[in-house]
Amino acid sequence: MAGQVPGAGVPGSGRVRAERRGPAVVITIDRPEARNALTDAMWEDLRRQVEAAGNADGVRAIVLRGAGDQAFASGADIKEFGTTRATPEQARESFRRVMAAVDAIEAVPLPVIAMIHGYALGAGCSLACACDFRIAADTARLGIPSGRLGITVGHRHIRRLVHLVGPSRARELLMTARVVNAQEALDMGLVDYVVPAAELEDFTMDLAARIARCAPLSVAWAKAAVRRCLEDPSLASVGDDAEAATRCYGTEDFREGVRAFLERRDPVFRGR
């Protein structure tokens, strides 16, 4: 899979591109001259590309990155706000496009890995928080400086941040607009790994490859189950957990996994 995904609504930006790399799709926010700030059209493109990757045969993971080494994404394009958010009505439509793209990251059944070079700010940081893994270069800087712009952050963005860093750290980041370096982000749980910038891509693609060696249905179940546990800690919505968690036993992948173990070989999973 490569190139843009056609769709209706906001015209395509041509600034979000996807490239198939083995079992992974690498989605690149491609506007380095603006530190990969996302326009409304780019948010729409990002949603389409994520959904297309989720429906593509043989894809086992998504890697999300920014072009160049200056930024993962520096947030929504503030220069657009005069036209896209000039009124509360316009702001709601613009915000819904942002939320749709970020929610798509969380909803897609594939693991999504954020590869963070440079800045991940505002909605760019929220985008990273929605990913399943966040790998940062040692030069990365992360934060949600919405207080400096007089704007607010959606509840789902904040919930993801709280799940990662806890309520006290979330309050600090949001109320002080502080931008933290990679090591502090690691210490507070905002990122999962920090690696030298020169090793970031190799480390990220190695993680994608390790995920790809596991059974796709098991990986998709793990992603959905973790999300369910976070959203409903009582698990009241799960119902019969034994019934829900044992559906895999009727799959081809389960039978292949058992055969491969007994035959002392690597399994070949098909996602069926």
Image (cartoon, rainbow, N blue to C red):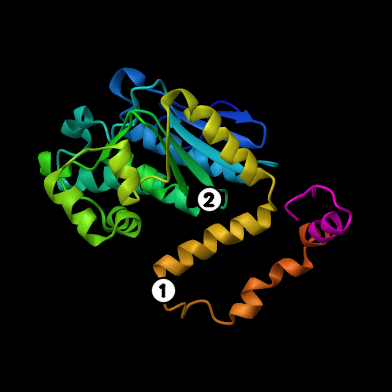
| Left or right, 262 with reference to 31 | right
- Please, is residue 169 above or below residue 201 in the view? below
- Please, is residue 142 above or below residue 230 in the view? above
Location of the C terminus by quadrant is bottom right
Residue 98 appearing in the image: no
Which SS class for mark 2? loop
Could you say which is closer to the camera, residue 86 or residue 116? 116
- Please, is residue 89 above or below residue 32 in the view? below
Mark 1: few/some/many CA within 10 Å (<14, 14-19, 20+): few
The residue under the point 35% across, 20% down is 32
**Location of residue 106 in the rendering, given as x and y in whole percent from the top left corner:** 46, 52
Q: Which residue is label 1 attached to?
A: 233
Q: Which residue is label 2 attached to?
A: 108
Q: Quadrant of residue 25?
A: top right
Mark 2: few/some/many CA within 10 Å (<14, 14-19, 20+): many
| Left or right, 184 with reference to 255 | left
**Location of residue 251 in the rendering, given as x and y in whole percent from the top left corner:** 77, 63
Tell me if residue 241 is in the magenta stretch.
no
Q: CA distance from mark 1 to mark 2?
A: 21 Å
Q: Quadrant of residue 21?
A: top right
Amino acid tagged 1: Pro
Tell me if residue 269 is in the magenta stretch.
yes
Residue 204 appearing in the image: yes
In magenta, the rendered stretch is 256-272
Which SS class for mark 1? loop
